[in-house]
Image: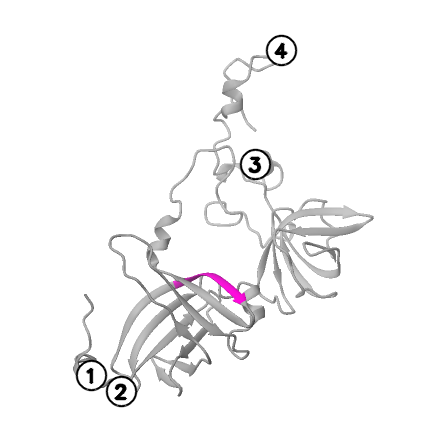
Amino acid sequence: MRTLEPGLAAHLAGSETTLATCWRITRKDGLVLGFTDHDRPLSFDGTAFVPAHGLDGGEAPARLGAQVETSEVLGVLHAEAITEDDIVLGRFDGAEVETWRVNWQALGQRVLLRRDAIGEIVREDGVFRAELRSPQAGLNRSMGRIYGALCDAELGDGRCRVDLGAPAFHATASVVRMEDANRLVVAGLEGFAEGWFAWGSARWSTGRRADLRDRVVSHGRIGGEDVLGFAAPLGEWVEDGQGVELWAGCDRRFASCRDKFANTVNFRGFPHIPGGDFVLRHPRAGDALDGRAVVR
């Protein structure tokens, strides 16, 4: 049960109320935005809450136990705060949303109703509908490790320990042209082997995708030109001459960890455990059946 501030409790017990709803959105890049369904700007806790045209919060049913509570915010896109480009580019994915109930005549009288994360965002005819998921949604994530031949660390993290800032694993390139929605030709990778940046990452230094990261899934060299393939479509936000930072990729195999990064001591997979195909296959001439380690 919530404990209300005495002033707010007295206000709610009265015959008339002057209440408004405020939403504070904190994106993963640190940007904080405030909106309210009131017709005048409000401000508290260092955040200015501006009137949002057509913004409305849906019902938020309460559930017992660890069930995920969901609600939604429906509103008209506001060009100065929430743009359609920012939604498509994923800048609001996973953002934290605080929902406050405030007495707009005495802003000290307020209560935090919910703290959620933005899930799916649907856009249609200039209107967005953002799904709000309660913190219990985090319980649906897989925790712990899984025994498998592939490494389960992220390249360059505290478990992997590869220095991605080293010149051998980092490069700056520029866009020459787009091949299609997922592939583009870049210049500046002539000193690296073909495939070096496959399964790596890219961060855009200029343009509308500035500071966003995308997963690189392929790195080919065709006719002397380096062609990068991306996991998701790049849309219309990449232009010729645009700068991009690239980091080498890893396919998580033991051989790649050994030959490309010389980092077998930090390999976080289990390459010596035989897989299901090894258990089920019939013995063949030339098979190593002397108990030696099986390394993929």
Left or right: 220 in relation to 285: right
Q: Which residues are magenta?
A: 117-123
Q: Amino acid at mark 4?
A: Ala
Mark closer to the observer (2, 3): 2
Amino acid carrying label 1: it is His
Residue drawn at point x = 51 percent, y = 30 percent: 271
List the residue tagged with mark 4. Answer: 285
Q: Amino acid at mark 2?
A: Ala
Q: CA distance from mark 3 to mark 1?
A: 63 Å
- On the image, the x and y values in percent for residue 140 come to 37, 49
Residue at the spot of label 3? 253
- Which residue is drawn at the image coordinates 53% and 66% (left, top)? 123
Taking the magenta stretch, the answer to whether it contains residue 120 is: yes
Tell which circle, 4 or 1, labels the residue nearer the N-terminal end: 1
Numbered mark located on residue 11 in the image: 1
Marks 2/4: CA–CA distance: 84 Å
Which one is earlier in the sequence, the residue at label 4 or at label 3?
3
Mark nearer the N terminus (2 vs 3) = 2
At 30% from the left and 62% from the top, the residue drawn is 61
User: Answer yes or no: do the residues labelled 4 and 3 have beta carbons within 8 Å?
Assistant: no
Around disc 1, counting alpha carbons within 10 Å, would you say few (fewer than 14), some (14 to 19), or many (20 or more)?
some
Q: Nearer the viewer, residue 217 or 192?
A: 217
Tell me the amino acid under the disc marked 3.
Answer: Arg
